[in-house]
Each structure stands twice: as structure tokens, then as C-alpha cells.
Amino acid sequence: MAVQDQESFREAQSKLDAKEDLSPCMGRWVALRNGKVVASDLSAKALRGRSEVRLTDAVIPVPRSRPGYFVA
């Protein structure tokens, strides 16, 4: 496990923060690159298989307005 100082951790986390409204993607998985959505899909596996998604992109679930489950 790599050890990071607080500043480098905050810098890495800030790159994952979405810089746009994710409400159109509620209930879906999104791929983020530099805070911008590059693709979305109903499953993380399908999203990773899309040509526009890079290995370095962050893949995160966008919650629904009500509790639910995500299929990875």
C-alpha cells in the first residue's frame, strides 16, 4: 500500500470531483476524467468496456434520489 501525504491526497481527490451536474446520470455508473463525465452506463463492467473510457478514468456510481443497488 502506498503512503501519501495529506496534500498529495487532496490533489488526487480533487481530480476525481465532478465538475458538472451528475443528476442526468442518477442510477448509473459514470467515468470521470479531470472531473468531466466521459461516459455512463448501467453497470461498471459495461462502462469499462466502452472505447471512450481509459484505464486511468475514475469509475463511480451516481446514487439515485432514493436508496437502491448498483450492479458492478
Image (cartoon, rainbow, N blue to C red):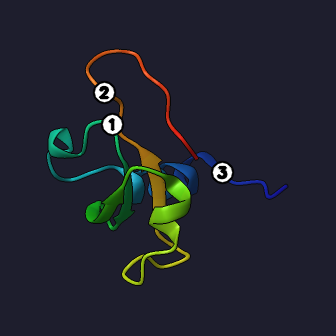
In the picture provided, is 65 more to the left or to the right than 72?
Answer: left
Disc 2 to disc 1: CB gap under 8 Å? yes
Quarter of the image holding residue 30? Answer: bottom left
In the picture provided, is 24 more to the left or to the right than 49?
Answer: left
What amino acid is labelled 1 in the image? Gly
Q: Residues within 10 Å of mark 1 (few under 14, many from 20)?
A: many
What amino acid is labelled 2 in the image? Arg
Residue drawn 21% across and 44% down?
22
Quarter of the image holding residue 3? Answer: bottom right
Query: Mark 3 sits on what residue?
Result: 5
Per the model, the C-alpha gap separating discs 2 and 1 is: 5 Å
Residue drawn 50% across and 58% down?
12
What quarter of the picture does the N terminus occupy? bottom right
> Dot 1 lies on which element?
loop
Which comes sooner in the sequence, label 3 or label 1?
3
Residue 49 at x, y = what percent?
51, 74
Q: Residue furthest top?
A: 66
Query: Mark 1 sits on what residue?
Result: 27
Q: Residue 64 has which mark?
A: 2
Q: Which is more toward the observer, 44 or 35?
A: 44
Q: Residue 2 has which mark?
A: none
Vertical order, 57 against 20 (above or below): below
> Dot 2 lies on which element?
loop
Q: Which is more toward the observer, 37 or 7?
A: 37
Residue 67 at x, y = what percent?
40, 16
Q: Which is more toward the observer, 49 or 36?
A: 49
Which comes sooner in the sequence, label 3 or label 2?
3
What amino acid is labelled 3 in the image? Asp
Per the model, the C-alpha gap separating discs 3 and 2 is: 33 Å
Residue 68 at x, y = what percent?
43, 21
